[in-house]
Amino acid sequence: MLAETSLSIWGWGSLGVVLFLITFGPFAIFYFAFYILCFVGGGFVVTLLFGKNNSEKYLEQCEHSFLPCTSVGIPKCIEEMKREARPIKIDRRLTGANIIDEPLQQVIQFSLRDYVQYWYYTLSDDESFLLEIRQALQYALVQFSARSKETDWQPYFTTRLVDDFGTHLRVFRKAQQRIAEKGEQMKDQAEELVDTFFEVEVEMEKEVCRDLVCTSPKDEEGFLRDLCEVLLYILLPPGDFQNKIMRYFVREILSRGILLPLINQLSDPDYINQYVIWMIRDSNCNYEAFMNIIKLSDNIGELEAVKDKASEELQYLRSLDTAGDDINTIKNQINSLLYVVKVCDSRIQRLQSGKEIDTVKLAANFGKLCTVPLDHILVDNVALQFFMDYMQQTGGQAHLFFWMTVEGYRVTAQQQLEVLQSRQRDGKHQTNQTKGLLRAAAVGVYEQYLSEKASPRVNIDDNLVAKLAETLNHEDPTPEIFDDIQRKVYELMLRDERFYPSFKQNVLYVRMLAELDMLKDPSFRGSDDGEGESFNGSPTSSINLSLDDLSNVPSDETVQLHAYISDTVCADYDPYAVAGVCNDHGKTYALYAITVHRRNANSEETWKTYRRYSDFHDFHMRIIEQFENLANILKLPGKKTFNNMDREFLEKRKKDLNAYLQLLLNPEMMKASPALAHYVYDFLENKAYSKGKGDFARKVPPLIQKTYSDPDHCRVAATIDDSVDDNIPLRVMLLLMDEVFDLKERNQWLRRNIKNLLQQLIRATYGDTINRKIVDHVDWMTSPEQVADAVKRFRDAFWPNGILAETVPRRDKAIRMRTRVAGKTKLLEIMPDELKHIIGAETTRKGILRVFEMFQHTQLNKRMVYVFLERFLETLFPQNKFHELFNKLHSRSKQMQRYKQRLHSTQAPSLQKR
């Protein structure tokens, strides 16, 4: 029965399926399944929504039942937020000068538009955030402008900027020398130079090294972010600074959008080369200077770029179809280009083979050299310094310095006698005083070089020396009193094999020819100013008193001197006048009243004398030149070019000068240097102070060169010669010439001669008001017109025609190399011939090319830009200890860490011994 029932069910089922498929088709089963699935899904969704609504209603009922009532303020805040935002009023005044504010507002607008708005509007239409950022930027600029107006910019532009550039150049020069000492061909010399540069920097700076910031883009960005955040902390109000979102936006705009692109552009060697060419665009390139650059180039890339361009020009000229007169011009051009290609090929092969030739050594060992007569050497600035170095090596310096001293004595004596004659014609009589001074100077020359006590002594005929001594004892000295002995000394230097004949066989003679630019041209051209130049002065300490400084000074050893500065008084020497500032013929200065007590066994005297700071400075320079051991003991208060008439500053200087006097008059100091008493008494005597070592003593340096405390391992500002007058352009020019042409490595005679020439040039050009003119120029540079012009140039460079400038594609390497050659050629072309005659052609070329090469390394350029930026911020915010901040920011330097490890390893053994 069950079997029949199951069979009937299967039968009816099968029949139903067959009829369903026949009626609806074979795909009907899939439609049926889909309908069932949709039905089930729909029921699930309806159930879910129903449950969600019921749950929300239940939770709302629970909230009102069990929680306390909400505060009235929250709905009110919500209502305020839903209201339409009110426009924020922004004061568009920034610096107080409309001419500056207008371009600054455009810079702010362009910065927000291109760095913030283009992505912010995709997130929100609310402009309040953008307005708050703009307001914060404007507030920071207002604070920055206020600080700038309160800052004295003269010391920054006239002192710190020049010192930092000179220090940078010194570090580069020492790095070059260190690499040259290694004497090996390195695979990547540029990278080795950069590493060595920062090694020298940390040795010189001792507290900071900027290698990470200059060589690592990641560290550079981090440094700029930290710096911008510090600036925002200083410039923004605390509430805005605590807003992290806005602070980060402003920080990124400043660091990544403005500072980083600007620093990258200023550090690009190609940009600097183009700027140099633009600066001297009025100078035409000289063919000889161009060929000198090619022959001196040690960069294969430069030579290949020039060669390729010359070959390209050759192909073009050869393709021209010309006739007549033009054919001769084209042939000359082709021959010139062929010569250029030949020189480039030869130079490239020499560099690739590593067989570089020193032309000086080559000339010394091969070929006939031209002869420069001794009389020309003695009147040529460049030649004389090499002959002086040679004479010191051979022990004949006394002969040369005697000859030069006599030349100086003759000129000075003639001038003094001419002045005496003119005064006698005017009815003034000072015959005895002038003749006494001449006699004292002549006796000083005799004692220094010809007497038995002279060391070193000029070896000359004893009869002539005795005759001179007799003349000095019984007759008035004349300008020609030393002529006979001077002629003998000249003949001795000319004919003695130890001196001039051997000098012509020495390498110094070849280097002299190179400086005179005579290795390539065997004809002596001499100095343009040879006939008019004479070398006046005394090279030794005993003659360094000027003619009007020689006076009778008591030599009683029992004399005791006590002195102190009692007040600062005015120029009429009236102690009861208004204390402080004096004015004499338009020159403003301070005058110090010194009360002096002089006591000996029989009497006691008291008087007052009056001295300016410049008198103290001249006296200080005189005594440290005579007593070199006092240079590290006596420290005169430093100069201050600007704002040196402030009452507070004058009081401080008075206190420092008093301390200087007490140290100078210390009995132990007098015992250590007995001859010092004569100088001190002369300075404190109640008479007008005769300033200056005089023309007679300034021209030639001391016989024994002064030693300096390792100047190559300290900053430039630490080694500035205090004998330079308080003259800004002289200081700047002398400092730069020292570093560019490495004058400190040369003898001090050359350096002093250069200083005198620069003084004459500056005084002839600008007169005595040069410092005032420089102050006026700095004021002009920081005037609203100039600042506005700088802002406009910045705006036009980054947003030409109001559109963000695209990144300039890097120029082709060959073009960059040819730009380098053009820049070097123009720099050498503008160098005046007078400079070559003063310091030598070879030294001039090396100095100019050293400066140009320094700017060909991006990392080193960045270092210089960052140093200038750091000094700028230290000057602008003197109370914020930026110096310590920068030391901390650069503390992760690898070079600094290695330097500290070396320092610790060298100090550890000495500590263990103790």
Image: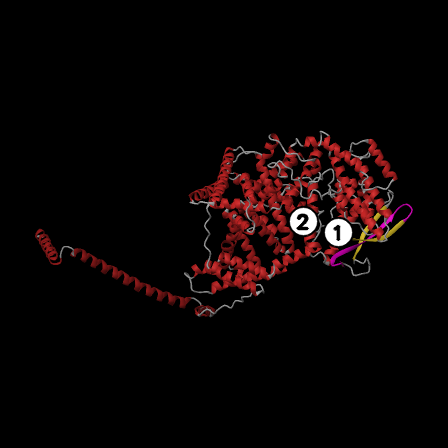
Instruction: Look at the image and tell me whether residue 689 can be seen.
Output: yes
Quadrant location of the C terminus? top right
Q: Residue at x 41, y 61 (%)?
A: 123
Q: CA distance from mark 2 to mark 1?
A: 16 Å
Q: Nearer the viewer, residue 582 or 138?
A: 582
Main SS, magenta region, reads: strand
- Magenta highlight on residue 854: no
Bin the neighbour count of mark 1 within 10 Å (Cα to Cα): few under 14, some 14-19, many 20 and up: some
> From the viewer's perspective, is the residue at label 2 or at label 1 nearer?
2
Q: Residue at x 79, y 38 (%)?
A: 483
Question: Where 751 sits versus 788, above or below?
Answer: above
Question: Where 686 sits versus 131, above or below?
Answer: above
What is the quadrant of residue 486 in the picture?
top right
Give the mark nearest the N terminus, 2 or 1: 1
Instruction: Report the residue marked by disc 2.
Output: 731
x and y percentages locating residue 585 in the rendered image: 75, 58
| Residue 231 falls left or right of residue 409 | left
Amino acid on which disc 1 is placed: Ser
Q: Nearer the viewer, residue 207 or 905?
A: 207
Amino acid on which disc 2 is placed: Arg
SS for callout 1 = helix
- Magenta highlight on residue 593: yes
Bin the neighbour count of mark 2 within 10 Å (Cα to Cα): few under 14, some 14-19, many 20 and up: many
User: Please, which colouring scheme is shown?
Assistant: secondary structure
Instruction: Look at the image and tell me whether residue 248 can be seen.
Output: no
* Residue ranking furthest to the front: 324
**In the rendering, which numbered label is found on residue 614?**
1
x and y percentages locating residue 413 in the rendered image: 80, 44
x and y percentages locating residue 773 in the rendered image: 67, 57
- Magenta part of the protein: which range? 583-603
What is the quadrant of residue 895 in the picture?
top right
| Residue 163 falls left or right of residue 561 | left
